Image (cartoon, rainbow, N blue to C red):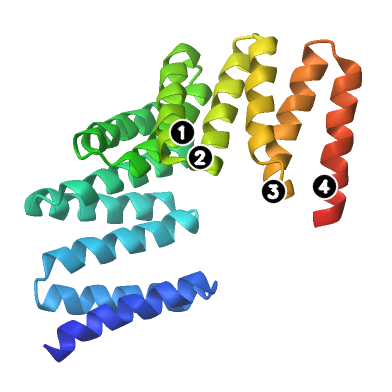
Amino acid sequence: NDKNSMAKIMNSIAILYYQTKRFDEALEYWLQALTIAKEFDDKLKISKYLNNIGIWYWKDYDYSKAIEYYEKSLAIKEELGDTRNYGKTLNNLGEVYYDMGDFSSAIGYFNQSISIKEKLNDNKGLHSTLVNLGEAQIYNTNYQDALPNFRKSLSISLNLEDFYKISLSYQGLGIVYFNLSNYDSASYYFGKADSIIVDFPEQRLPTLSWLAVTSMTGGQKTKALNYIQSFNDIFEQTD
C-alpha cells in the first residue's frame, strides 16, 4: 500500500533529520509517520515510531513525555510478543529515570531489560545495559551490587573484542573501587581502561580525570600532576 510505504519513508526522513541535528523537523515527520501507521493499525510500526518519539523527548529533556511514549510502545510490544524490542525499550525507560535522578526506578528497568537480553543471548545489548545498571547502582551507593555487573560486562566485552566497551567496563570497576576507598584497585582498573584507548585522545579525558583524582586521594601527588598535565595537553589539542 502506497500510504503504508509513506509511513516508512517519513520515518527514514525523520532519522535523517535527527542525525543532521534538525530536531524539530525530525519530530514532525515521526508524528506524521505515527499517524499513518495508526490509520492502518500497523502495530509493529506504531510501537517503533512511539519508541523513536520517546527517544526524541528524552534527548530534549522532556522526561515525562519520553516516559509516556515509551510506555505506550512497551504495551504494544508486549501485546505483539516482540520480546527483543521490549527489552530495548525497558533499557530506554531505565535511562530516562537515570537522567531524572530516580536511580531505584532505573535499576528496576535495567534489571528487567537484562533478564530479557540474557534469555535472547543479546550480548551486545546486554553489555550496554549492564554498564547502565552498574552506573545507576554507583549513584544509588549500591557499590557491592555494581561490582559483579561491571565484571560481567567486562567478560562480555572481552568476548566481543570491542575495545571501547572493554575500556568502559574497566572504568566502571575503577569508579566502584574508588567509592569503596580501595585506591590501589581503582588506579589499576583506570590504568587498564586508559591503556586500551591511548590512541583515542578525546576518549581518554574521563579516565585521566579519574586517574588524577585517585592518585591525589591516595597521596600520590606527582602522579596526579602528571595525569592532570596529560589531560590539559589533550584538552588544548581538541579545543
In three-dimensional space, the C-alpha distance between marks 1 and 2, rounded to whole angstroms, equals: 8 Å
Label 2: which secondary element: helix
Query: Horizontally, is 211 left or right of 156 in the view?
Result: right
The answer to whether the residues at label 4 and label 2 have Cβ atoms under 8 Å apart is no
Q: Amino acid at mark 4?
A: Ile
Q: Earlier in the sequence, mark 4 or mark 2?
A: 2
Q: Earlier in the sequence, mark 1 or mark 3?
A: 1
Residue located beneath label 2 in the image: 165
- Which quarter of the image is occupied by the C terminus? bottom right
Residue located beneath label 1 in the image: 158
Residue located beneath label 4 in the image: 234
Q: Is residue 102 visible?
A: no
Q: Is residue 154 above or below residue 76?
A: above
In three-dimensional space, the C-alpha distance between marks 1 and 3, rounded to whole angstroms, equals: 19 Å
Identified at 55% across, 71% down, the residue is 21
Q: Nearer the viewer, residue 8 or 128?
A: 128
Identified at 50% across, 70% down, the residue is 19
Label 1: which secondary element: helix
Q: Earlier in the sequence, mark 1 or mark 2?
A: 1
